[in-house]
Image: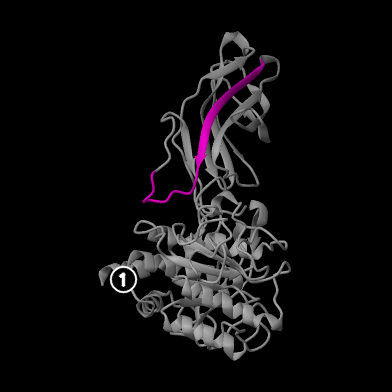
Amino acid sequence: MKGHRAACVAALAGIALLVAGAPARGDTVRITGLTVADLTPFVVMFDVESGADQAFSAVLGQVSLSEATGLAIDQFAVTAFDLAPGGRARIRVESRWEFQLAGTYLVDATLDLGRAGLVSATLPFRIVPVPLPLAPQPVGPSEMLTLVQEPANWGVDRVGARTAWTVTHGSPSVVVALIDSGIDSTVPQLADCLWVNDDEIPGNGIDDDGNGYVDDVHGWDFRDGDASSLVGTTLHGHGTSVAAIIAARPGRYPVVGVAPGVKLMDLRFLDSANQFRASDWKLFARAVEYAVENGADLINLSVFANSKPPSLFEQALAAARARGVLVVGIAGNQGKSEVMYPARSDAVLAVSATGSDDTLASFSNYGPEIAFCAPGQGVMTFTVGGRVISQSGTSFAAPHVTGALALLLSASRGMTAAQALALLEATAVDLGTAGRDDRFGHGLVDAWAAVCEALRR
């Protein structure tokens, strides 16, 4: 995974040595200061100290990474080095990849001194999930080296989410309706993200709350006409990826959402190919209506169409706006100056996609309807089954904006939709031409700046 390249540097720690064989004159060569210096990429460092009066030439070795149970994960070669009599060497072993899986591990460094034998040292260490400042911090053995995951998605930092977490991680009372291809809630880091309809008794086959949908505990599958995205036709991974960008909780993998405390209303609309037909606009409108009628604060529409919606769908969007529900949509991925529907509608906030250099992604559409831009290129997230993948598209830019709005609403629950939108506009980082423009809208959303401004009012 391509995580954020911040160093997770730990203090050097001593370690008991296992020395096999003896250098000349009975003196010792030992490994000291063995540490894991970074996770992105994975870096191990240690010192080699010689008490021998002989030189060692072209010393070879390896560093092994294993689980605490002893299950091997990988091995890395130590570049050959020379060790003078009574000398000292600093060794750095850097992998070409990162390692950020939360858990407890062992790293072992072994050197081959030829006829003098082997020298090795072992260090236990643990990796803990991306920290949320307001959440209880993980506890463990104080003497164990502890390293902290960095978010795999560079966009989390780029939109100021991690700094905003010092104020709020997102309130569970803020509900984001995700009208998409469905959420794979079996992914452990998404399992606790789902909105719960407290007025519905799960699995009793009765429409307890009288809203017209039976057993709709977490939302509704408008594609299959049932209460769960996990049953019926095959689930496409698009919705799961969008959901993780908004609200994935910290966990084993370094994937975490922009607003990992909010709840997601799962409204499946797209089919197993991540598409819908012209005849499905009525279903689409019903999904929007469901979100509004069941208390959603925000609706994320990472969906685009090649034609203008019928009036019934436009009416559903207008009703959402009238009820104070903010709807976030996508510009489209044809790389042209035309914002696609439904983001082209007045009631939707159209989002374009940027790369890590804050320029417009080559695939991103643009136009006068663009409200904001957000990271949408090379975004690390989950797909169906919990696999971590890199995604690119305006579909993955929009949830950064939705997440930023969710943090803003969480920080000030009395704020109206109009006030939240005005704050996000006022605090966005201006890109491109000064002022609002067709490529970046008001600019790159800045959740931290918006939250700070909200707290000042």
The vertical placement of 447 against 118, above or below, is below
Q: Quick one: label 1, few (<14), some, or many (20+) residues within 10 Å? A: few
Where residue 198 sits: x, y (%)? 45, 60
Question: Looking at this rendering, what residue extends furthest in the top direction?
Answer: 25
Where residue 19 sits: x, y (%)? 59, 16
The quadrant holding residue 333 is bottom right
The scheme the figure's colours follow is one colour
Q: Label 1, on which residue?
A: 414
Where residue 256 sits: x, y (%)? 52, 55
The quadrant holding residue 266 is bottom right
Left or right of 270, for residue 33: left
Q: Nearer the viewer, residue 392 or 295?
A: 295
Picture residue at 62% right of the left edge, 65% below the top: 239
> Label 1 is placed on what type of residue?
Gly
Question: Looking at this rendering, what residue extends furthest in the left direction?
Answer: 457
Note whether residue 276 is visible. yes
The quadrant holding residue 229 is bottom right
- Identify the secondary structure beneath mark 1: loop
The vertical placement of 47 against 306, above or below, is above
Picture residue at 40% right of the left edge, 62% below the top: 173
Give the magenta-colored segment's residue range.
117-136
Left or right of 39, for residue 72: right
Left or right of 398, for residue 280: right
Note whether residue 376 is visible. no
Picture residue at 46% right of the left edge, 85% below the top: 436
Q: Nearer the viewer, residue 26 or 372?
A: 372
